[in-house]
Image (cartoon, grey):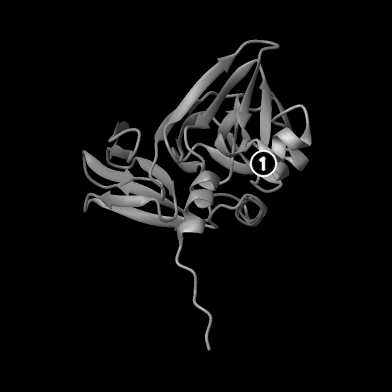
Amino acid sequence: MRYEIRYQPSYSLAVITLEPGERFRAEAGAMVSMSDSIQIETKTGGGLGSVLKRSFLGGESLFVNDMVATQPNSQVTVAPALPGDIAPVEIQAGRNLLVQSGSYLASTPEIVVDTKFGAGRSFFSGEGLFLLKLTGPGLAFLSSYGAIAAIDLGPGEAHVVDTGHMVAFDEGMGYEVRKAGNSWKTTLLGGEGLVCRITGPGRFYFQTRSPGGLLDWLIPRLPRQGSSN
């Protein structure tokens, strides 16, 4: 399998090239185009329990599509729903990646996608009570609204990120949601809301734009339905 990410970071498109018999797995609805030599096999992407957790608790589709090549140099392209970036992440054996709901786009079929209970940490970030847990070895493609940036933290190092901008982080990193300022007044009136303090060692990924920020900007500008007489 070979891949190329085009049109970054605003309108990223992942171009995947497969040889006969090779497979590539994508979330339902992620496929943009494909060679006529690609066959699609729709699957549940795991055992029934895992699939139901991923769908109803993790906010992901119940089904995934396996793209199978039948001829050399077969291509399939995938992209996220929102304008934004795609980041390929190699997940080594023994390393798990925790991903916010909606940021998993596609992967090689060896990647296992499950859910992990996030308790109040994930709840307060607006992403529900569960995170997706990706287990390797394999290659995963993460998507975002805006560009994706990665930061490596050493042992004990910490970084603060707005909760609406988090994309993914290595399992085992410290993850604490707290007020943006020293008081609730600063948090509520300063426009920052809640933030995530993430602690190393490990790598985390964030997006340069927030879907929540887009909605905050868009909703007041939508036409209001007039009252009927």
The picture places residue 172, in percent across and down from the top left corner, at: 69, 24
**Residue 66 visible to an observer of this rendering:** yes
Q: Position of residue 81 (x, y in %)?
A: 41, 50
Looking at numbered disc 1 in the image, what kind of residue is underneath it?
Ser
Q: Is residue 144 above or below residue 176?
A: below
Taking depth in this image into account, of 154 and 43 the one nearest to the observer is 154
Q: Which residue matches tag 1?
A: 125
Seen at 61% across and 24% down, the residue is 94
Expressed as whole percent of the image width and height from the top left, the position of residue 114 reads: 62, 43
Tell me the residue at 49%/69% (across/down): 224
**Residue 27 vs residue 40: left or right?**
right
Residue 102 appears anywhere in the view: no
Q: Provide the secondary structure element on which disc 1 rests.
A: loop
Looking at the image, is 201 positioned above or below residue 126? above
Q: On the picture, is 114 further left or further right than 25?
A: right
**Where residue 118 sits in the image (x, y, percent)?**
72, 40
Q: Of residues 163 and 16, which is closer to you in this image?
A: 163
Tell me: 172 left or right of 67: right
Q: Quadrant of residue 5?
A: top left
